[in-house]
Amino acid sequence: MKTPRRILRLPEVERLTGYKRSSIYRMAKEGQFPQQKRIGPGAVGWDSREVETWVEKKLDGVA
């Protein structure tokens, strides 16, 4: 069963992936990580399902 979809902020994305800010933004720019979504003025977040799928693919050796 999938977990509920939610918005992840950068500290949680860092914790879930093991990557720091600069690596996350670099990979997103290169198309190797889910893009952040604007959630308000000066605020961005990531779709939890997109990040979870990315992590699963990494663990399975797909990506």
Image: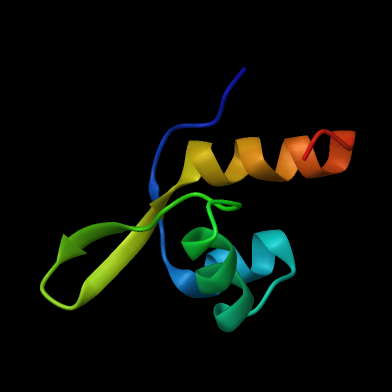
In the image, residue 2 sits, relative to residue 37, either above or below, namely above
Q: 14 and 4: which one is in front?
A: 14
The image quadrant of residue 6 is top left
**Residue lying furthest front in this view?**
30
In the image, residue 62 sits, relative to residue 1, either above or below, namely below
Determine whether, in the image, residue 40 is placed left or right of residue 48: left
Residue at x 61%, y 52% (from the top left corner): 32
- In this rendering, the count of numbered labels is 0
Q: Position of residue 62 (x, y in %)?
A: 82, 33
Q: 45 and 62: which one is in front?
A: 62
Residue at x 80%, y 44% (from the top left corner): 58
On-image quarter of the C terminus = top right
Determine whether, in the image, residue 45 is placed left or right of residue 51: left
Determine whether, in the image, residue 46 is placed left or right of residue 57: left
Q: Position of residue 30 (x, y in %)?
A: 54, 60
Q: Position of residue 46 (x, y in %)?
A: 41, 54
Residue at x 47%, y 63% (from the top left corner): 29
The image quadrant of residue 57 is top right
The image quadrant of residue 17 is bottom right
Residue at x 55%, y 72% (from the top left corner): 26
**Residue lying furthest left in this view?**
41
Q: 9 and 35: which one is in front?
A: 35
Determine whether, in the image, residue 58 is placed left or right of residue 16: right
